[in-house]
Image (cartoon, rainbow, N blue to C red):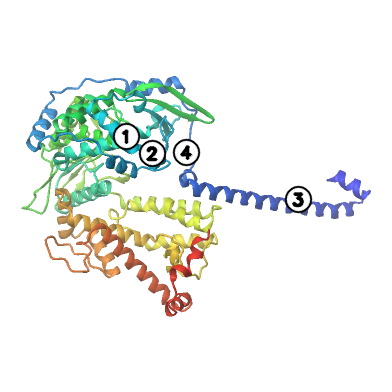
Amino acid sequence: IAAELRYQHHTLNKAILLVVKERFVEKIRVLGTIKKSLDRKLRRLIDNRVFQTDPKRWFQPPAPVSGEGPSVEIVEEFWGGLYEQQRHLEGGASVLTGFRTFCCQHLRQRADFSPITQEEVIVALKGMKNHAAPGPDGINAIWWKRFTSVHSHLARIFTSFVEGSLPIPEWLVEGRTVLVPKKGDMSDPANYRPITCLNLLYKIFTKMLNERVLHDIQPIWQRIVEQRGGKRGLSGCKENLLIDRCIVHDSRRYLRNLPMAWVDYRKALDSTSHQLILMLLEWLGVENNLVRCIGDLVPLWRTRFTITSGDVQIISRVVQFRRGVFQGDSLSPLLFNISLMPLSVALRAVEGYKAGRPGDRRHDISHLYYMDDLKLFASGERQLKLQLDIVVKCSEAVGMEFGLDKCAAVHIKRGRVDVGGEDVQLVDGNVIQHLVIEGSYRYLGLNQRSIVDEVQVKEALRSEYKRRLRRVWRSELSGKNKVAATNMFAVPVLLYSFGVVKSELKPLDRDTRKLMNIHRSLHPRSSSPRLYFPRECGGRGLLRVESLHDRLVLGVGCDVVNSTDPLMDFVHEYELRSVQDFLYKAADGAAEALGWEFRRGRGQVMPANSLVGMSKSWRKGAIRSAEQAILYQQHADSPMHGRFFCLIEEQGLSAQLTFHSSSQLA
């Protein structure tokens, strides 16, 4: 700058140089402002384009990584040692023999095989995402959906696979497993989660196999009520948490003993015995051709592991699956759940916790399962030890191992947590530790000691919700995309707790509006109800937390009333008689606010305005319509904000056409 000044002004006068310097500094400041503005504009364009094409890429925060990724040799040694090591199955173990007897008692006549139809192929394709990550073949589902002329040929080929007239090619079954980092040292391959991307043809085929196997095992599958993972029509985690809460409150109310234990398996999905799966499919009465076909598929399971460390991508050799299941198709979760069925039946032989009012303790609950998350309930410490011994013996028989560092026990004596409870000695010599005084266990995503720690859970959820809100509303996304991002990224954090934890909802909606005000996305005096209208009705389409809570609580409450599940019967009875119930109270309040009625009784003639007697689809529509009507009325009653809406109604104008252009704006 000084050299340019001397050249242009031919002077060394200090006063002149200072004036000229200020002028140049101001130019530099303006250029800096312009650069920042251009950077923001570029970031706005990139962020909105990324969000519109693939929202997950925008949501995904950078994972905290410590250390470099493992070498290919370490990856092959760890995962190859896990999958390629086949363990001996003790077919004569008492738990397996008992399950075979159970199957014989409830088995129905084995059905004959019918050829796979073109309609089955179409149904299997319909539920697949168009652009999900493909397997080694690199073909997305959208192409198989659009090439309708091949559907009949696929049905013929799949039928040949099941009948055994055509061998299954090895390339069809090979997967591409991506190792996704979890937490901890990234040089340790154990700190990665394997997600297998499979060929679309294989996923279509196994989806149809899954439907047929599920149909064949239905008589026994329905009787394993303790397993609520992978079952259709159930809110598995939420229902397990509801049952768990009712059990603990029952023990507290009637001052009863309740020893409990949380059991975790080490690499459960990766340790399942193939021999066990095929044997159980036979016992469950699955059609012979299906069992033989699955038996042909299992030896072909193989994959290559891919891990990305910085700019380097590591690809391993082909690893053969001699145990464990894929984690990327429809059939694998069902096969894993089938492998756990014998344990559920064996645990019923030990007396569980007897729940119910004095003199009518008819609900015997010994355990709850959600996939591999197992929680045990017993009537005494001796019974809990018997249950754990059964779990150990069954695990040894099928080749699975405990993750002792993630197992825990707690004893409730006469309704209070026993702070001096002793550790539980297992039959194999290992020890499950009793929870420390201030300790808690994370069960199905929520921290609990004897019950869910509501204060801690509420604070954690509200903190995470606000963190995500700040990330969305301080971003460079457009107004429309910010609302969509809030609905997809922030609001779902809260949904899991609705119906399980008592929620304070209005402060959460206030937090949302306050943050929008701070980031100049909402005027302080603008209409709050209009914020929650759909965009095609003149609103902004933001999801209202209070409305979502009411919908979910009413849905869960109606499902409990209508359910024939014995565990849901216990929840229903508890909610009817308990002073500590909150699900039905919340459902009553929500229904009353919407102008509907929540009838708790069973076997009654339901009035026309009762939500309980409706089908799920009708109930959802009725609740949404009532919510929108209330919000619209609140907005229309405002003398300033409602004037335009009232004018549209008075003149008989079409609201859809009136707000069509605004709904298309970004």
Q: Residue at x 47, y 57 (%)?
A: 483
Q: Give the Cα separation between the discs numbered 4 and 1.
A: 41 Å
Answer yes or no: do the residues labelled 2 and 1 have beta carbons within 8 Å? yes
Residue at mark 3: 28
Mark 1 touches mark 3? (CB < 8 Å): no
**Amino acid type for the residue under numbered disc 3:** Ile
**Residue 233, labelled with which disc?**
none
Sequence-first disc among 4 and 1 = 4
Residues at marks 4 and 2 touching, judged by CB atoms closer than 8 Å: no
State the residue position of label 4: 63
Name the residue beneath numbered marker 1: 154
Residue furthest left as drawn: 359
Q: Where does label 2 land, which residue? A: 144
Tell me the amino acid under the disc marked 1. Answer: Leu
Q: Position of residue 207 (x, y in %)?
A: 29, 37
SS of the residue at dot 3? Answer: helix
